[in-house]
Amino acid sequence: MAFRCLFFTLRRVTYSSRRYISLKTTPLDEAGYTSKRDDLTSRILKLVFPRRSASDVLRNWIDQWHKVTVSDLRNVSRLLLKSKRHKHALECSQQILSWMEAQNRFQMSAADHAIRLELIIKIQSLAEAEEYFEHLPNSSAQKAACLPLLHAYVKERAVEKAEALMQKLNDQGLTVSPHPLNEMMKLYMAMSQFEKVPSVILQMKRNKIPLNVLSYNLWMSACSEVSGIASAEMVYKEMVNDKNVEVGWSSLSTLANIYQKSGLIKKANLALKSAEKKLSAHNRLGYFFLVTMHASLNNKEEVLCLWEASKRVTGRITSTNYMCILLCLVKLGDIAEAERIFREWESKCIKYDIRVSNVLLGAYMRTGSMEKAESLHLHTLERGGRPNYKTWEILMEGWVKSQRMDKAINAMKKGFSMLKHCDWRPNPGIVMDIAEYLEKHGNVNDLNQYVKVIHQLGIANLPLYKSLLRMYLLCQRPGFDILKMMEKDEIEIDEETTALVQALKV
C-alpha cells in the first residue's frame, strides 16, 4: 500500500510539473523599493506573476495624470533584469519603450537596443534575437547589441555563427573594444580550439585594440594548452610590461592553475602568494577564488588564513561564501573545522539557507555517518530550513548505501515533489538500486508503477527495463506495455533482453 501511495504521488507530481510555472521571485527590498512606496517603479516591481502586464500598469499611471520619464523606464528595466524578472523587463524594454517611441518623445538609444536584444534571447528565442539584430537601425546599435548576441552564441557553443557575426562586425569596422573578441576567445576555450586564440590576439594587435586583463588570462591559458608552460610565461611577462593593464589576483591565479596542471606545485604556490598581495580590502570575490585553489593544492593553513582575512573585508559574508569555505574544508577532510564554521554561520544567519547545511549533510553521507546526517537534517528542520531537491538526493543516496530502502524511497518521493520548482533528476545509480530492491523484495505491480514514473521523466534505461522484464517473466505476465515504453525511449535491445522478450512470448 505504501508503494502504491508513493507511485500515485510521483505520477501526480510528474504530470503537474509539466504545466507548472514557477512563481519564485527575487527579493527587491535590496533595491530600496518596499510595498509602502507608490510610484511607477514600485508598482511595476510589485508584479509578481509573469502573466500580469507592465504595460497596463503604465497606462493606468498615465491615466491618473502622472508624469513618466525615459529615465524612469530605463531604471525599472535595469532593476527587473537584475532581479531576473525577464518577462516584465522585456515589456518595459519592448512594449513600453516602443509605445514611448510612437509618441515621438524620444529615440531608442544603442543601450536600449542591447537590453531589448538580451531580453529577447532570454524570453523568446535566439532566432528572434538574430532577426532583431539584423533590423537594427544603425551601426552604433549593432555595436552595442553584438555583445549579448555573441554571449548567447558562446553559451550555445555556436562557433560558426559567432565567427560569421565577428566577420560582419570586422567588415563594418565595429570591433574597436576587447569585449567581443574576449567572447570569441572564451568560445574557443570552451570548444578546446585553443590554437585559434592566438590568432584573435594577433587581430587585436593588428587593429590596435587594447588587450585587457581577461584577454591576457585567456591567452595565457590557451598558450599553456598549445605550447606549454614557457609560452604561457612569455604571455605573463608581456602583460607585466603592458602599462595599460594592471596585473591582479585573477591573472596570478590563472598562472598558478597552469603551474598546478603541469605538476609545478612550488611555482603554483608562489604565484598564489603573489596573488594574495593583490586582493582588495573592499571585495571578497578574489579571496574565495584563492581559497578554492589552495584547497586543490591541500594547503589547509592557507585556506583558513584567507578565510579569516576575508572576514575583515567590508560588507556582509554571504551564504555562498560560507558554502565555499565549507566545501574546501570537506575536500581537505577537516570535518571538525567545517562543523565549527557551520555553527558560526548558523549563529549569524538571518534566513536559513539549506544549501549551506547540505554541504555538511553530503560530507556525513559520503563518510558513512548517516546518524549524524539524520541528526543534522532534523536540526535544520527545527531551525526553519526548507529541504530542497539536493537535500533529498543526499539522504536518498545515504539510505540506499545503508540499505534502509523504505527511507530511501520516501526521500525519492520528497525529491520528486520538488520537480515543479527545478529540472532535477535522480542519480541513475540510485534509480537502479531502488529498482533492484523492488525486484528482490517487492511485487510486480510496485516495480511496474515505479518504472512507468521513471519512463515519464525520460530517464529510463535498458537495465531498468530488464529488471521489469524479469519480474514479468517470473509472474508469467505479457510485456507489451514494456516494449512500448522501450520503443518510445529508443532503447537498443541486447541479447539478454531479446531472450527475455522471447521467453515472454511477446
Image (cartoon, rainbow, N blue to C red):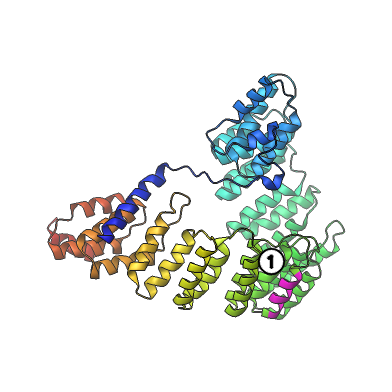
User: Which quadrant: the C terminus?
Assistant: bottom left
Q: Nearer the viewer, residue 361 or 344?
A: 344
Q: Of the residues shown, which amino acid type is indicated by label 1?
A: Phe
Q: Which residues are magenta?
A: 301-309
Answer few, some or many: residues within 10 Å of disc 1's Cα (few below 14, many 20 plus, some between 14 and 19).
some
Q: Position of residue 173 (x, y in %)?
A: 75, 39
Q: Position of residue 478 (x, y in %)?
A: 14, 56
Extreme residue in the right direction: 243
Is residue 312 shown above or below 155? below
Residue to which mark 1 is pinned: 289
Q: Is residue 506 visible?
A: yes
Residue drawn where x is 58% and y is 75% of the image:
331
Say if the magenta span includes residue 116. Answer: no
Residue drawn where x is 72% and y is 60% of the image:
316
Q: Is residue 128 left or right of residue 442?
A: right
Q: How many marks?
A: 1
In which image quadrant can residue 410 be found? bottom left
Q: Position of residue 258 (x, y in %)?
A: 68, 70
Q: Is residue 113 left or right of residue 159?
A: right
Q: Nearer the viewer, residue 261 or 480?
A: 480
User: Which quadrant: the N terminus?
Assistant: bottom left
Q: Is residue 139 visible?
A: no
Is residue 334 shown above or below 500? below
Is residue 194 shown above or below 230? above
